[in-house]
Image: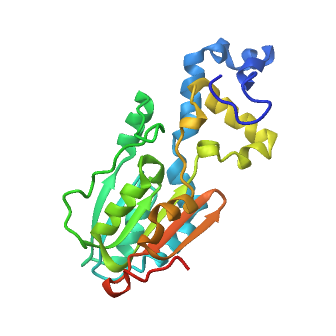
Amino acid sequence: MNYNIGETRGKATPWDYIRARDVEKMGDILHDPDEQARWALAFLVAGGLPYMWNELASNIQDICYALLELDEGDRVLIVGEEVESCGWKRGVEAHIGSTGSIDLFEIIEEGNAAMYAGRHGRNGLLAAWEWTYTHDTPDNTYDAILVAQAAQHTDDWVEAGQEFLRVLKPGRRIVSAESLIPGGGGLTASIDTDIQVQTWFDRIISPLQLKLSELGAYTAEEIKDAFGDGVERPGTLEWRGVHVFWGRKPLPSQASTSTTA
C-alpha cells in the first residue's frame, strides 16, 4: 500500500480479511477493487462537511462569527467548501443584514477535480493550488475574511496570507476554520490512539491508494506562523479536530509595532 502511519500499517488492509460469511451476506462484489474504491470514496466525502458543520460543530461557527466582529452593512469575503450547505453563508448574512454583501468563492468542485485527477500544488501536496481569487480586488476592500473549510487547498499560506491582508481593511479580522483530515500532514494522533478508528480509516484509504504524505492539513498554529507579524494579536483554537485561526490587520499607526502577544 502507499501509506504507512504506524508500525502495523502497510502490511495488509481490512479488505484482505474479508470472510466467507461477509461474501455470503453481501456478494462477491466485496472483492471488486473498483467497488471498494467507490464505497471508500462515498464514506470519505459524501455528506461529510454539511453533517460536521451543521450537526457537530455549529458552536464553532458561532465562535467564528464572533471572532469576525461582523457589523451591519459589512462586505465579507468567503473562500470555502460547501459554504452554503454547511451554513456559513447563512450565518454571515444574519450578522451583516440586508445592507451587507458577500463575495463568495466556492471551491468544492475545484478541489474535487484536483483530488480525482491527482493534481499537486507547488508544495507537493494533493489538491492544493495557488489562490488568485482576489488578484483583481483593490486594497482594503473587505471588512472581514472567512476561510471556511478550505485552508488545505492553498499551496502557499504565506503568499495567500499576504494577499488576504492586502484586501482586508486595517483593524479588521480574518478567520480560518478547518476540520482537518485525520492522517493528513502527519496528524495521526486521532487515528493511532484507537484501533477501531484506525481500521475504519484503513478501510477507506487503502482502496483509494492515497498517499497520506501528500494530503495537506494546515493546523491553526501553522497558519498563524505563516502570517507572522502581519497580524495583530493572532489566536488559535483546537476542538475535536477543528482548527480555528484568527488575526487582525493592524491599523496604519500600529503596523510597525504589531505583536503576536
Q: Nearer the viewer, residue 23 or 7?
A: 7
162 over 1 or under it: above or below:
below
Instruction: Note whether 85 is above or below 203 in the view shown.
Output: below
Q: Is residue 164 above or below residue 258?
A: above
**In-front residue for pair 49/150:** 150
Q: Left or right of 173: which side holds 207?
A: right
Residue 178: where, in percent of width, then height? 52, 57
Q: Identify the residue at horizontal 45%, vertical 72% (top origin).
A: 229
- Give residue 159's quadrant in the image: bottom left
Quarter containing the N terminus? top right
Please give the name of the residue rendered at 26% of the width and 58% of the height, measured from the top-left corner. 134
Asked which quadrant contains residue 249, the reply is bottom left
Q: Is residue 121 left or right of residue 261?
A: left
* Along the line of sight, the residue nearer the viewer: 135 or 63: 135
> From the viewer's perspective, is 13 left or right of 121?
right
148 lies left or right of 133:
right
* Residue drawn at the location 81% of the way across and 39% of the way down: 195
Q: Position of residue 77 (x, y in %)?
A: 32, 65
